[in-house]
Structure formats: structure tokens, C-alpha cells
Amino acid sequence: SGLLVRKIGGPSVMPYQPAGLWEESGTGKSYAQAHGEGLYRRSLYTFWRRTSPPPSMTTFDAVSREVCVARRERTATPLQALVLLNDPQFIEAARVLAEKLALEPGSTVDSRIDKSFRLLTGRAASPVEHAILRKLYDEQLERFAKAPDEANALLSVGEAPRGEKLDFAELAATTMVVRLLFNYDECVTKR
């Protein structure tokens, strides 16, 4: 999506995390979410509290900081799919990528589907895959055209500025396609 801040070094940051999580761990401290660049730093810079590590990182097999390991475990669980679909970090990344694709000169629905698939999987979509994604886009476009408040809610997730010039229903439908691709096995697991 282009949100990643590539700056090397600096203090720890506190990206998106569910509200109230630190309070639940009984430490008496509250989580102060970062803003701006602090939301988009590499996970290497994410602040860890031993009693309440970053949930999305632990869901994707981040190693406990209590021991040193040579290789981390890899799993694929339904919880990972839920994180990819519902975590504000991933929803925002999907929206920003959808905006970038929509703003490219000569952009069409089919070109956005093809380019997003290629960017996220490293290969071209088969005709069957493209047809499935196009059907999803058309269904979501119809849904968001009838419910602009739902489109606005989806496109309002995250702090990255939103392009106001784009059609909300089209952008929301493209965002849904990208969100689905984030859950595609080839995007989640490198084989």
C-alpha cells in the first residue's frame, strides 16, 4: 500500500491495538497509540509489554520474548483470517492500496483487480480467479451503492488521509477485493 515507513532506527512505536487490552492485563497502565509515522513502522520497532504482547503479532506466530529461537513456527489458523479482515491496520492498508490503484492513469475495474492480484501474490490471476474477484467487486459495488454509510464507515478506518475525489462505492468495493486478497493463502504464506 505504500504506508510502511522505511526509516531505520528510532524509538519504539505503539501501532493499532484493541482498546483496553493493557488494562485487562492488570498492570494499571493504558496503551497510548501512536499517530502518523508511528502507526506504519516495521514491527521490529513495536513496543512489547510481556503481559500483553501485540495481539496481531502473536496471532501470526511472533516468538515470545522470553527465549531465543533460531526459527519461528508457522501456522495457519482461522484467527489469522479474522485479524486480516478486521484489524484496522489491514483494513487501512487495503483502502490505501485500492486508492493508489484507482488513481493510476487509465485505471479500470479489471486493471485494478489484475494489478492488486499481481502485487499481492507475485503472479497474474488465472481467468477463474479474475472472474471470482470481478464478481465480488460487482456484488460489493451494488451493496455500497445502496448503503453509502457502510462505504463511508469502511473508508474511514485508519488515520491515513482519504482521497475525497474517488467514488465512495467504487473505492469501497475495490477495498473489499484487496481485503479478500490479503486473506488469500498465497499472500499469507510464502511456500
Image (tube, rainbow, N blue to C red):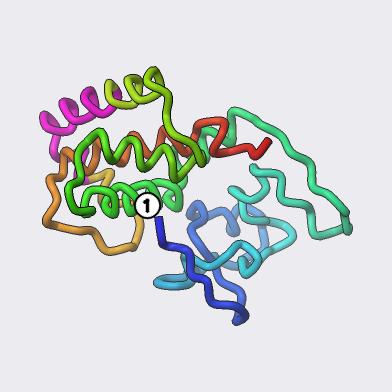
| Residue sitting at x 77%, y 52% | 63
Does residue 15 sit above or below 115 in this rendering? below
In this picture, residue 108 sits left or right of residue 55: left
Most frequent secondary structure within the magenta stretch: helix
Q: What residue is shown at x 60% (from left), y 78% (from top)?
A: 8
Vertical order, 21 against 4 (above or below) = above
**For the point 56% across and 31% down, which residue is it?**
185
Place of residue 80 in the rendered image (x, y in percent of width and height, measured from the top left): 58, 36
The amino acid pointed to by label 1 is Glu
* Rendered position, 150 above or below 139: below
x and y, in percent, of residue 90 in the image:
45, 48
Secondary structure under tag 1 reads helix
**Which sits in the foreground, 68 or 24?**
68
- Image location (x, y in percent) of residue 6: 52, 71
Q: Which residue is more in the foreground, 142 or 104?
A: 104
Report if residue 149 lies within the magenta region.
yes
- Residue on which disc 1 sits: 92
Which residue shows up at 43% across the image and 40% down it?
118
Q: Quadrant of the N terminus?
A: bottom left
Q: Nearer the viewer, residue 6 or 78?
A: 6
Q: Quadrant of residue 100?
A: bottom left
Query: What is the x, y in percent for residue 165?
Result: 11, 56
Q: Quadrant of the C terminus?
A: top right
- Magenta segment, which residues? 136-152
Residue at the extreme bottom: 10
Q: Residues within 10 Å of mark 1 (few under 14, many from 20)?
A: many
| Residue 167 in magenta stretch | no
